Image: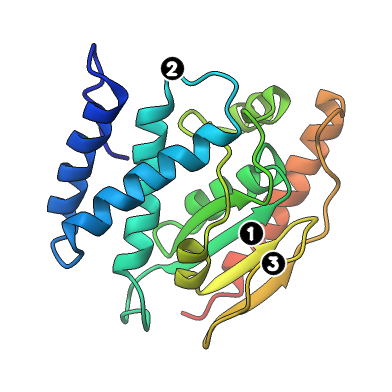
Amino acid sequence: MIESDQGGSSPDAVLRSGAKRLAARHPDLDPQLVERVVFESHATLARGARVRAHLPPLALQFAADRLQALDRRGTRAEGAPLRVLVESIRNDGISQMAAAYLNVLGEGRIAALSGALNPADQVLRTVGDVMAEDGVPLTDSFPKPVTDDLARAADVIITMLIEHPFDLVDGQRIEVWDFDDPAGLSTDEVRRIRDRVRRQVTAFVEALPD
């Protein structure tokens, strides 16, 4: 996660400052490309946001994920974590659960991100509550769109209640995980979904080659 020095600065100033830090982190990428991705990420999140006060730091976090994906184009290096992208319709519940468990239970063997076709404003409170109960808080998580750069960088794409919106690239594989949508369900029902997701992720991790 990239830090933001927002303070009293204007959004543009925060984004430009963040873009410089991200460019230093990715010396193989053109600084102009880095800045373009930062501002494009901000514009993308702004289109669906009701409250825009905290958008610059979220945009920088989103841009950091996208730039890391661009920097990882091509064949996965030996010993590098498996790159997994989890997709859902709103990225406010089921895909957030799956990505969080993949990162935790994968113990460094998996680097998972999640995204949506139509991102919600925020993660469902019930989902955040039941994940915190299980010791996997979603504190820094927020709904974000699936982008072509994130999709192309993934080794495995997991779809949950949607179809993958892009063509697969060479070497990618796709898995379809069938779960109920936690939106509008009771806390007990969301807990049951959480436990099913955890079992699915555990099976996924156990099936990874040594």
- Residue at 83 percent of width and 59 percent of height: 178
Q: What residue type is labelled 1?
A: Thr
Residue designated by label 1: 202
Identified at 69% across, 31% down, the residue is 127
Badge 3 element: loop
Callout 3 crowding tier (Cα within 10 Å): few <14, some 14–19, many ≥20: many
Q: Percent position (x, y) of residue 78?
A: 32, 82
Q: In this view, does 33 lie to the left or right of 185?
A: left
Residue type, numbered disc 3: His
Residue at image coords 42%, 65% = 109
Q: Do the residues labelled 1 and 2 touch (CB within 8 Å)?
A: no
Closest to the camera, between mark 1 and mark 2, is: 2
Does 123 sit above or below residue 77?
above
Looking at the rendered image, the disc whose residue lies closer to the viewer, 3 or 2, is 2
Of discs 1 and 3, which sits in the foreground?
3
The answer to whether residue 78 of the structure is visible from this angle is: yes
Amino acid type, residue under disc 2 in the picture: Ala
Q: In this view, does 174 lie above or below 1?
A: below
Q: Which of marks 1 and 3 is nearer the N terminus?
A: 3
Mark 3 or mark 2: which comes first in sequence? 2
The disc at residue 164 is 3
Please provide percent x and percent y for residue 54: 42, 21
Q: In this view, does 208 lie above or below 130?
A: below
